[in-house]
Image (cartoon, helix red, strand yellow):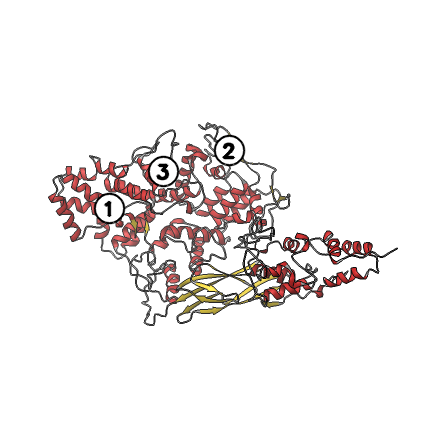
Amino acid sequence: MALRTFSPAGVEAIIMSRRVVDGWTERCHSDVLRASGAGNVLVWLAFAAVGLSVSPAAGDMPVSFQNDVMAVLSKAGCNQGVCHGNQNGKNGFKLSLRGEDPEFDLAALTRDMAGRRVNGFDADSSLILLKPTAQIPHEGGQRFAVDSTEYRVLKQWIADGARPDPTGVPKLVGLDVAPRKQVLVAPEDRVSLSVTATFSDGTARDVTRLAVYETSNQVASVTPEGEVRRASVGEGVVLVRYLDRQVPVELAFVPARPDFAWSDPPEVNLIDRHVFAKLRTLRIEPSALCSDTVFLRRAYLDTLGMLPTVEETRGFLADDRLDKRDRLIDRLLLRSEFADYWALKWSDLLRSEEKVLDRKGVQALHHWVRRSIAEGKPLDAFARELIAGRGSTYQNPPANYYRANRDPTVAAETTAQLFLGIRLQCARCHNHPFDRWTQDDYYGLAAFFARVRLKVVANSRLDRLDQHEFDGEQVIWIAREGEVVDPRTGGTTRPRFPDAAEELSPGEDRLEALADWIASPDNPYFARMQANRIWYHLMGRGIVDAIDDFRATNPPSNAALLDALADDFVSHGFDLRHLVRTILRSRTYQLSSEPNETNRDDAINFSHALVKPLEAEQLLDAVAQVAGVPVKFNGYPLGTRAGGLPGVRAFRRRDRAPTGGEMFLQTFGKPERLLACECERSDDTTLGQALQLISGPVVNEVLAEDDNRIGRLLAEGKSTAEIIDELYYVALSRPPNDAEREAAGLYVAVAQDRRAALEDVLWGLLNAKEFLLRR
């Protein structure tokens, strides 16, 4: 029988037809042997040319696909979402996002396009080398040079046969970066990072050249070799990534300030100790203490969401006791408005709005939240009741948590973000690109909610075409069967706690188990998240910012401070009032918003108070309080404060036109409560807000009301000076200074209509920056 011979292309076709993702099989070699006969020299020369053998040994490959080639693809940016890591790939070439699936990438490089991307006969002519070096047109431009480390690694792998790793190749188990944190004082302007990878066989390698470096802001730039160079003064994070491990490096570039001398301000509690320690390291001097008038107004707004009365302001300013601020804080924490204000914040997060929960459900949930805060229920117990809630949404209000989060994946995403500060959404489709959370974590958490069921007792919705509108009682119950399907495998997923290997025991109540794990004192995520949220509401910025995005690539601005707050929160039984009191008593909270030369550009280290606009409800209640006229809301009795509203709006716009107060709240950023996120509330300034304050219906109505504050003071026979003083006290929590008193008095004195002139004064105060801002 004549020997059959094959061209190199024919050999490649036979090989590619039987290649499998995890390596060469015995079938591949036997097919060629059967086709060619044992003496076909051309076939065996072809195998030799591409570096293949019948039984490849573990030590034959100096370049590892998993540990080297995958690192090069990441370093060159080939597997980024904007490039071939895109969901649809680029120009017919698709890689897994950030290298999360090496087997897929191996197939894409060696099997796709009939293996044209790698050329075992002439490695230098491989597309995977020609395109990123821009030797032929490449939409992504040049990614590395011909004489680079990346080129040499890829070329060697191709020349060795473009083979998968043999069994037993060591796996990456650790990544170390030095330094992990450093403060560079001018003229120092750069630092070189050293990256070491540790593998499962105990070996360690310097991978500085193949690591990927990403900066969090424009403070610094990083060279491919890992040298960080200052671009401006400030703090930033460099994320160092190698394969599936990533390490954040925190760097601060500080001006020299040769004359800097720490003033050694007194430390009231643990907050000041950690804040001042970092400020001293950064050569930043904290601002002075704020005045009594500023502190009074700030404390009322931050704890009660409202302004102090004229009598409260006069009394506090006249008090000459040294501990009067501490006494004020203690009184505020016992006020009923404290529960109103913090119930408002939790109602935003729990998506308490009328379309999904219906009006009765909204009121039931708000009442439960408010009562929990008023009674001092610990936040761990509060969270447990929500997560494990079931039964009638009217009779057991925490069950409304699942009325708003009806799908297991939505419930998983909301629970992780709300109680743990973990944004799992990215892991729904792929492993999180900026954190350690995987798809296993995502579907393992979603599995806890797979058996949650909703029984619609009644639904009297007005819009029969709107399947998302609910009006009527619902019952949350737990089925005996039901699992989440993992779309990757088509199989079911067992409940599993994030970042933990163990699964839930069969028969264990899933929601109870999850509630216990989340709210456990040993769970660092829960305590840190809640402490950070409370800090954000009082200080204007989270220690971790955004406040519900706790990931390695978004480290806290002061990790020691956050740890101390969380530990103190746990040790005091998750007591909301204790943590609020601790923060308000600190010198850090009571600092002035007036910056000094050293802290003028600081926005993250709490060296001075952050100025922020009043929230929508705060502002509307302040307008009503200053004018002495209640604002109307549909469906609620006159006199209801904006900060005490249970939901968003009681009636649909098509059924009843919104009141001026409801339009005011919407204009100033009250959230629709469609997201379980603080980010839904807007504090952006708009032209509509200016128009509301200048000539909007609310302002016009409260000024024109006969029996408003001005009308009552005139009826009581108060002098112009007395009326002006009271307006300043109620609006700005301080008396007018001499210049203000004289100017306002003169304006009223020369006016033909005294009341109209006083209305103008009041209008001016309602539009003053000092009134509109929390300082």
Above or below 352: residue 743? below
* Residue 304 location (% of width, % of height): 33, 45
At label 3, the amino acid type is: Leu
Q: Secondary structure at mark 3?
A: loop
> 332 or 32, which lies in front?
32
- What's the CA distance linking mark 1 and mark 2? 47 Å
- The answer to whether residue 206 is above or below residue 611 is below
Where in the figure is residue 368, as x and y percent of width and height?
42, 39
SS under mark 1:
helix
Question: 206 or 201: which is nearer to us?
Answer: 206
Quarter occupied by residue 159: bottom right
Q: Which residue is mark 2?
A: 475
Tell me the crowding category of disc 2: few under 14, some 14 to 19, or many 20 or more residues within 10 angstroms, Cα based. Answer: many
Vertical arrangement, residue 353 with respect to residue 69, above or below: above
Q: Residue 731 bears which disc, if any?
A: 1
Taking 19 as reference, is 597 left or right?
left
| Residue at x 41%, y 54% (from the top left corner) | 542
Q: Classify 10 Å Cα crowding around label 1: few (below 14), some (14-19), many (20 and above).
A: many
